[in-house]
Amino acid sequence: MSDAQAPVYFIAHFAVTDADTYRNYEKGFFPIFKKHGGEFITLDDSVEVFEGERSSGRTVIFSFPSEEAGRAWYNDPEYQELCKFRWEGTQIDSLVMVHGQPPR
């Protein structure tokens, strides 16, 4: 299995600033997410920071089976259209992709 086929993990840090607008994002998220093989891992509205600084808000962790699948999800035109609700309803600190280790 090549690195391109190793799983990738996304970590999002954001604060919901307009719950009604953000709900529109949530309603459309999972069908697109599942279409690309996404797997929800967890979310936490009260993370505990041991080092560094982080504003309050939500942390979400999810994965895709490969970098290709993760990029296809993010670049999906339907998802990008849906993102307008996330951009309008949250203050995002970061959305990062972390590469997993291929099986050894």
Image (cartoon, helix red, strand yellow):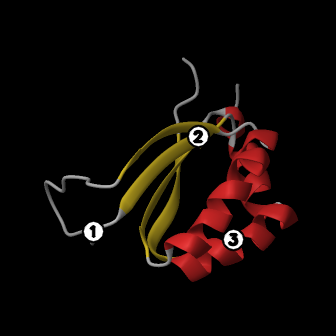
The amino acid pointed to by label 3 is Cys
Q: Residues within 10 Å of mark 3 (few under 14, many from 20)?
A: some
According to the image, label 2 marks what residue? 63
Looking at the image, the residue that sits furthest to the top is 104
Quarter placement of the C terminus: top right
Q: Residue furthest bottom?
A: 88
- Mark nearest the camera among 3 and 2 is 3
Q: 76 and 6: which one is in front?
A: 76
Residue 56 is tagged as 1
Query: Which image quarter: residue 23?
Result: bottom right
| Element at label 1 | loop
Residue 59 place in picture, x, y as percent: 39, 55
What is the residue that sits farthest to the front in this orientation? 20
Label 1 or label 2, whichever comes before in sequence order = 1
Task: State the residue in front, 18 or 71.
Answer: 18
Local crowd size for mark 1, using a 10 Å CA cut-off: few (<14), some (14–19), many (≥20): some
Q: Which residue is mark 3?
A: 83
Could you tell me which secondary element the residue under label 2 belongs to? strand
Q: Left or right: where does residue 45 sit relative to residue 96?
A: left
